[in-house]
Amino acid sequence: QVQLVESGGGLVQAGGSLRLSCAASGRAFNSYAVGWFRQAPGKEREFVAAASGSGNLAYYADSVRGRATISRDNAKNTVYLQMSSLKPEDTAVYYCAARPGTYYYTRERDFASWGQGTQVTVSS
C-alpha cells in the first residue's frame, strides 16, 4: 500500500478555483489507480474523479464534470485535482485514494489506501 497526504484545501469564494494535491509514498506509483472522493457534513462520502495509472484515462462524477480536472505527475508521485467555478455545495472534506491497477476505479470499496483528507469550504 501507499501512504497518501492531501493538501491545498481552504476557504474560497463561490466561482473561484482551487487545486488539491495528493502526495504518495512508495515506488511504482504509475501502477496505482487514483481517485478523489469527498464527504460533506451529514452526507456519505461520494466519488469525485478518478484516473488510471498512466493518467491517460479519467472519469468524473456528473456533479463536477466540466469543472474538475484530475491529473498526475508520476515522477513526483503526486495527484492533483483542479476545480473551478466552485459552488457552496462543493464544500466537503476531500480525500485522495489509491489502489494497484492500471485502469480507473470509482467505488470506495475499490480503494485500499486513503489519505487523511483536506477541507474545502466554498462561501457564497
Image (cartoon, rainbow, N blue to C red):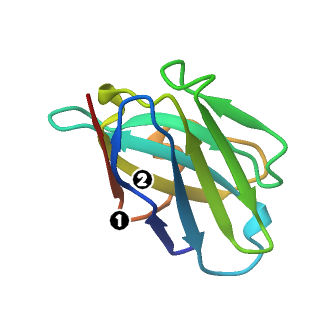
Q: Quadrant of the N terminus?
A: bottom right
Quickly name the residue at label 2.
95
**Residue 101, percent from left and from top:** 73, 54
| Residues under numbered marks 1 and 2 in contact, where contact means CB atoms less than 8 Å apart | yes
Q: Residue at x 69, y 72 (%)?
A: 77
Residue 116: assigned label: 1
Q: Residue at x 27, y 34 (%)?
A: 44
Q: Residue at x 76, y 44 (%)?
A: 103
Residue nearer the viewer, 2 or 76: 76
Q: Report the amino acid beneath label 2.
A: Tyr
* Residue 82 seen by the camera: yes
Q: Residues within 10 Å of mark 1 (few under 14, many from 20)?
A: some
In the rendered image, the vertical position of residue 62 relative to residue 58, given as above or below: above
Q: Quadrant of residue 56?
A: top right
Q: Report the amino acid beneath label 1.
A: Gln
Q: Quadrant of residue 43?
A: top left
Q: Secondary structure at mark 2?
A: strand
Residue nearer the viewer, 9 or 56: 9
Q: Residue at x 47, y 35 (%)?
A: 47
Residue 108 lies left or right of residue 70; in this view the side is: left
Residue 11 lies left or right of residue 75; in this view the side is: left
Residue nearer the viewer, 99 or 121: 121
